[in-house]
Amino acid sequence: RRMARLLISALETAGHKVGLASDFRSYEGRGRPDFQNALAAAARVEVDHILETYNFARPEARPEIWFTYHLYYKAPDYLGPPIARAMNIPYVVAEPSFAPKRAGGPWDTGHRAVAEALQQADAVLCLTRHDMDCIAPLVTPLTIPGGEDLDRLFHLPPFLEATPYGLSAAQRADQRQSLATRFGVDPDKTWLMAVGMMRPGDKLESYRRLSHALHYLTDENWQLLTVGAGAAQDDVEAALAPLGAGRVRHLGAIDPDHLPGLLAAADIFVWPAAGEAYGMAMLEAQASAVPVVAGEVRGVPEVVRDGETALLVAENEPSLFADAVRQLIKDTARRTRMGKAARHFVQTERSVAKAGDILNTALASARTSHRIRAEISEAKY
């Protein structure tokens, strides 16, 4: 939901009007083919309803482009492809995922639907290079008769609205004093902060790896502050308990509006990133002028600049992770330089406005792609 809202904001910032066409949910998480088929049938009814609605709408209310966010084998897009075909408008996809290993498995229906959608798409935006590798064979450039090839695949790095984080960073001393008073954190220690939902799976594994790494730093003067809650909260607290009650402060679930203030008070953001797609919290930390230590996992390198705004270490190497944290604990000047570079990086390279520019390029290409494919199809018949 967070990235979906940011995409809407970026599109609106770039001058587009965005409307939510449907609240239909195609997700099926247990691998039941009969239920997937039922969802596909329900989607066909929804498609007819949407098309009828648009057919009776004023011309200015009809969409010019269909834009789908985050389709994958458990949640394919059953709406966009048929509606775009019926309305003869470009079809655009953002943050898709395609895993060839899912072919023939319990989610084969969704897997094939994703492949068909990507092949139809006039433009596909991937948030990480990692995702692009599997998607590229399905989204090949369009060969323009008598001209250059037209790309259909675009890289849209993760981004955020950095202003609230920058404002809080400018009040770092006040934010730090407030946090120390509210939660009883020692202001003379180096504050390590981890932000992540406390749920089973990868998030819990990240907390466990973090605890293992911090065991190597018992000789340093630090406190760990965790932000998050969830079904695995007891397991997270148990995993961190051996570090000592004086070492760890659980701040619990925090209103998103208050997160910039908490991040601004931190010294180092720490997250092993087990199975992390890319990690919005790392962008938020950098926007708050806080350097990051993280595992070099999947899309994490997309949201930081290793050696400049963050220190990335090999996945699940606790001693190396600890060494990176130790470097920043001992070198306050380096932390400050990296924090300034991090804030500048997010403001200039990962802003909503920057994302809007990339989206505009992709949408313009999608219009051209749609027109040319229509011309090629007409010429064949």
Image (tube, rainbow, N blue to C red):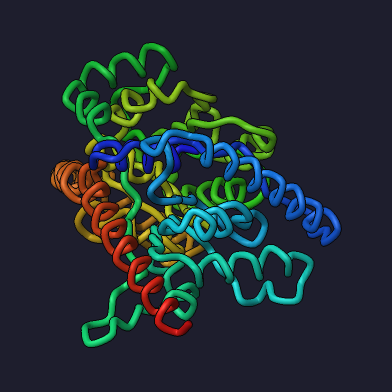
Q: Is residue 268 visible?
A: no
**Residue at point 68%, 39% (across, down):** 235
Q: Is residue 31 visible?
A: yes
Foreground: 199 or 63? 63
**Residue 193 at x, y = what percent?**
40, 36
> Could you say which quadrant of the image residue 234 lies in?
top right
**Residue at point 83%, 58% (across, down):** 32
Looking at the image, the residue that sits furthest to the right is: 34
Looking at the image, the residue that sits furthest to the front is: 381
Judged left or right of residue 219, residue 10 is left
| Whether residue 359 is situated above or below residue 131 in the rendered picture | above
**Residue 168 at x, y = what percent?**
24, 24
> Could you say which quadrant of the image residue 130 lies in?
bottom left
Foreground: 180 or 56? 56
The count of marks equals: 0
Judged left or right of residue 63, residue 114 is right
**Residue 179 at x, y = what percent?**
36, 18
Foreground: 187 or 298? 298
> Could you say which quadrant of the image residue 259 lies in?
top left
**Residue at point 29%, 54% (across, down):** 304
Foreground: 88 or 283? 88
**Residue at point 31%, 73% (across, down):** 151
| Whether residue 369 is situated above or below residue 160 in the rendered picture | below
**Residue 164 at x, y = what percent?**
26, 26
